[in-house]
Image (tube, rainbow, N blue to C red):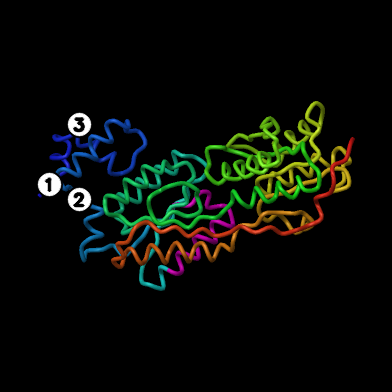
Amino acid sequence: MVTIRDVARRAGVSAMTVSRVLNGSASVKAETRQRVESAIQELGYVPNAAARSLTSRRSDTVGMIVSPMAHPYWSQVAATAQRYLLSKGIGSLIGDAGDTGEAEQAQLDMMLRQGVDGLILFPLLLDPTIVTAISRRGLPVAVVSAPGDYEVDSVQVDIRSAARDLIRLLLARGHRRIGMVAAMPQRPLMYARYQGYLDALSEAGIGDKSLARWLPPIGDWRELAAEHARELLSPPHAVTAIFASAPDMGVGVIDAFNAQRLRIPDDVSLVVFNEIPALFSFLTIGLSPPAEDIGRLAAEMLYERLRGYEGGPRQRLLPATLRMGSSVGPPQKR
């Protein structure tokens, strides 16, 4: 039987380095990772966690890594997946990845050490190659919502198209100076909104990217969005509309409007991605599909893998929709 030490000798590394590769650690250099993966393939080594999933000695437990768990939408996605799996006799270990790549990697390492039979991941900053490497070791994986080629089953939301449609609405009313407030461009979900913003501007022949503002990963996004909105409203930018890429940012932008006594949509227009408090129901927003749909689809696909489905990676792309409000009007000179 091939052991982890055999792989280490073939790759010319330590057994600890092989373990880090198997656990998806981001601390291993790409060249070293490739040598280890080649040795694993040549020797036919099967890691313990994958071996358990391929024999009758299953744990009947899957891991879910949610980022961030505190977000009501994603916690509902996780809860729906958990209920579905429980109905099939499978338990769930749920880890909160917070807002950092380090916490996300630590949760993943822990799940793999626990010997779960499969994973449902809500990638925050996780490298798709790590997800692919885990899947190739024989552990079923389903990815939720994050755009990208993970080479595993995935349930994705067409966020880019919804963001593009929101900007098209503003362009159709005559806006040309449209600001955007977003956070963490390295997060796939946020970057997809930025791509949709750029898509619509490009269609209209607008190549100026200077009106997008990025917030830091940690901080009071409402207050930070308000600061950026005040700057965008002032010369030389003087935007006539703003796209807020998250609800708390939208509230911050409204704070900035109120401080300058600007009325929506009489003086300035605003569109927001995802639901915000009922007080602001007049806004035109992009909406993700019901959390229950995403959670159920991800759990169903993972369950099918656990029960022997061996087909290629499946992708379910769910549309995001627009809810028309009264927050978009023609551009006004101020």
Give me the residue at 71% from left, 59% from top. 323
Mark closest to the chain's N terminus, 1 or 3: 1
Amino acid identity at mark 1: Val
Q: Secondary structure at mark 2?
A: loop
Query: In the picture provided, is 143 more to the left or to the right than 185?
Result: left
Q: Position of residue 329 (x, y in %)?
A: 84, 49
Cα–Cα span, label 3 and label 2: 18 Å
- Callout 2: 10 Å neighbours few (<14), some, many (20+)? some
- Which residue does the numbered mark 2 point to in the structure image? 46
Q: Residue furthest top?
A: 236
| SS assignment for the magenta stretch, majority | helix
Q: Which residues are magenta?
A: 65-84
> Residue 260 falls in which quadrant of the image?
top right
Note whether 295 is above or below 89 in the view shown. Answer: above
- Callout 1: 10 Å neighbours few (<14), some, many (20+)? few
Amino acid identity at mark 3: Val
Q: Are marks 1 and 2 in contact (CB under 8 Å)?
A: yes
Mark closest to the chain's N terminus, 3 or 2: 3
Q: Residue furthest left?
A: 1
Q: Is residue 79 magenta?
A: yes
- Which residue does the numbered mark 1 point to in the structure image? 2
